[in-house]
Image: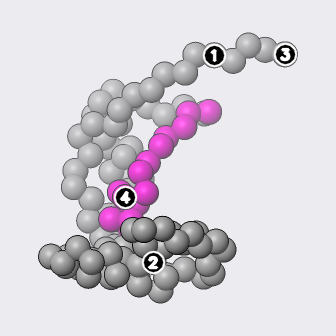
Amino acid sequence: MSTPGPVTVLPVTGVPEVSRGADLGALLLAALSRGGVALQDGDVLVVSSKVVSKAMGLRVPHDPDAAGAARAKEQEVLRRSRAVVAERRGPAGSTRV
């Protein structure tokens, strides 16, 4: 059995603001290229769910009322969900998976 190689973590810098419809893959590859980084077989690229959501246009309009914003977010998540597998209720509200 071979010994695994080292793990190197590099930030991807220079990614512009991501908006609905953005080609996230192209934006990331361009930023990596500008930074002198080329992906190779076996590399792992980690991307936050927030930036993916922004590229997909998954946004809820801003509501200055915190409770209203939480309700709007919850309703949007449920609207886009196929099924609720688990639910946990707490003092701050419900968490659904």
Amino acid marked by disc 2: Val
Marks 2 and 3, the one that precedes in the sequence:
3
Q: Which residues are magenta?
A: 42-56
Work out whether mark 4 precedes mark 3 in sequence or the reverse, and give the earlier one. Answer: 3
Q: Are marks 3 and 1 in contact (CB under 8 Å)?
A: no
Q: Nearer the viewer, residue 84 or 8?
A: 84
The spot of residue 87 in percent (x, y) is 59, 73
| Mark 4 surroundings: few (<14), some (14-19) or many (≥20) residues within 10 A | few
Residue occupied by mark 4: 50
Residue at point 52% right, 71% down?
A: 89
Q: What kind of residue is marked 4?
A: Lys
Q: Amino acid at mark 3?
A: Met
The label number, if any, that marks residue 1 in the structure image: 3
- Where is mark 2, residue-wise? 77
Residue 46 among those drawn in magenta? yes
Task: Name the element at disc 4.
Answer: helix
The answer to whether residue 60 is visible is no
